[in-house]
Amino acid sequence: MAETDQKDINVIRFTDNACKSIQVDKLLDLYLDLGTLLAIDTNDLNNKELQSRKDQYLKSLARDNTQILLNSIWELPTEKVENNIVAKLPKSKFILPREKPAPKPKPLTKWQTFAKEKGIKTTKKSRVTWDEVLNKWVPRYGYKKTKAEKEKDWIIEVPGNVDPYTDMFEKKSTIKQEKVAKNEFQRLRNIAKAKKTKVPSMGLPPTPKMTARQLNTAAQVANISTASLGKFQPKLKKEKTLSKSSVLNLKKRKLPAPTKDEEYNRNLKLADSLINKKPKLNLEKAVNREIFDQETSISERKKGGGNKQRKRRNNQNSKAGREFKKTTGKKRR
Amino acid sequence: MKTLSEERTKLVFEKLCKYIGENLKLLLDRPDGKYCFREQKDRVYYVSESVLKLAGNVSADNLISVGTCVGKFTKSGKFHLHITALNYLAPYAQHKIWVKPAAEQQFLYGHNVLKSGLGRITENTEKHQGVVVFSMSDLPLGFGLAGRSTAECKHADPLAIVCLHQADIGEYIRSEDTLV
């Protein structure tokens, strides 16, 4: 059964293919871009057929559209290369959407942000300038500029305020070198800023003259920069050294937060220690208590009540009371 | 929410001890579950641990308040009690001052309590002792420091300051936005 079925299908297919023509009619012409071998069909789909026999309909549609694409390829000029017919595809017109997101704008350098903030606009300089000594056009930079410079500066006058034996050529070259180094430092700093990486704050910055503080930190960093982290370095008596953590960018370690039970016990202990604090001899409190005792005794005596024993005790109290009166007499008046 | 460091806990406890003395232990040792002190943006909160667990779901930036705000740490590192702490100070207070009805309003407007407004005072109150201020009908109104000791009060002139004002329940209206 299966074999006969297969044969039947083959026969049907064969006859189907044979029937199909090269000519395909479309209501709207396809958009063809031969450079990318792209055909876009803008015709409406047949809804009825799409629902009833989806696969077959889509397959036939694809075949028809491919046929149109191949027809248009055959219209191109062809040539024979090693017994093969080759058509040269034209340049593609279709603009493919980009795969990756658009690149972000470059972060501004320190100078650019400053200029933007201040509204400084740079005018474009000409590439060459007129040199009046050499009587020719000299570029602003590049090998031709250095050549011209050499030609011009075959002799440099030593100014009056400088030691007459200084080498002015060497001086000039060192100034130039420092400028280059500074520019390089700033370039690297801009890159670091753009990438948001941390730049070590220590060390020697490329400045011609360093402050005492900068020298001090540099010396201290050098002191710590040994294999043993400066443990065996000789030290002066009053020398202040940097902490290792500040140089190595270490974080200060903290004690872990106490657990709830630990915290509870700690709090209880603290409360206990506060409550059971040994009371200092509070003079004021003692005096106040004395006044209170006296007054109660006086009021009792005035009432006329009380027995002998109480009177005796009151007499004892009155001695202390007299002493007190001397001290706080002013207030009572 | 941070747990208070030991130094800060000590400052908080010392301040509370001024008002409630030994009863401080009752705040820590409660029959209805454990309570603890927590710190958030320099404010100290007294929270039950069950509520604290729920508060863990809110990020620290978005958390405005949890439990009861007891007070805050000033920039110079001192601890100040807020009026919101009154709920816990009033029942445990060891030294109290009762204010006459006529002087109630003056106190609630943020003024000190004068001798003329003093209704009753706890025996043996020392000078500069923390006291809780009550109305004559035993309604807690606020707290402050004793300006005079009990014995001195009896002989003070009517305009003498008996209680230095620190906080009163009028603050709930007066400083509504800064209280939390």
Image: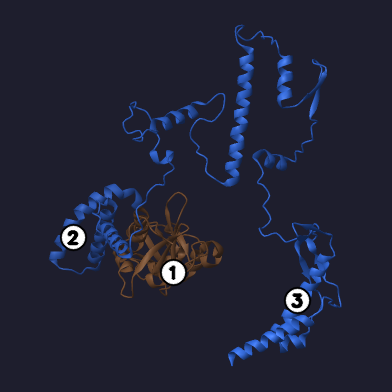
Q: Amino acid at mark 3?
A: Arg
SS at circle 2: helix
Q: Quadrant of the N terminus of chain A?
A: bottom right
User: What chain is colored brown?
Assistant: B
Q: Chain of mark 2?
A: A
Q: Nearer the viewer, mark 3 or mark 2?
A: 3
SS at circle 3: helix
Residue at 40 percent of width and 35 percent of height: A242
Horizontal side, residue A291 vs residue B111: left or right: left
Can you give x and y, in whole percent of width and height, for residue A201 in the image?
A: 50, 37
B59, A202: nearer the viewer: A202
Image position of A36 with respect to A108: above or below: below
Can you give x and y, in whole percent of width and height, for residue B44 in the image?
A: 43, 61
Q: Residues within 10 Å of mark 2 (few under 14, many from 20)?
A: some
Q: Colour of chain A?
A: blue
Q: Nearer the viewer, mark 3 or mark 1?
A: 3
Q: Amino acid at mark 1?
A: Gly
Give the CA separation, mark 3 to mark 1. 74 Å
Disc sitting over residue A63 in the figure: 3
Residue A5 position by quadrant: bottom right
Image position of B141 with respect to A198: above or below: below
Q: Residues within 10 Å of mark 3 (few under 14, many from 20)?
A: some
Residue B118 in view, yes or no: no
Residue placed under numbered mark 1 in the picture: B67
Q: Amino acid at mark 2?
A: Asn
Q: Residues within 10 Å of mark 1 (few under 14, many from 20)?
A: some
In this figure, which colouring scheme has been used for the structure? by chain
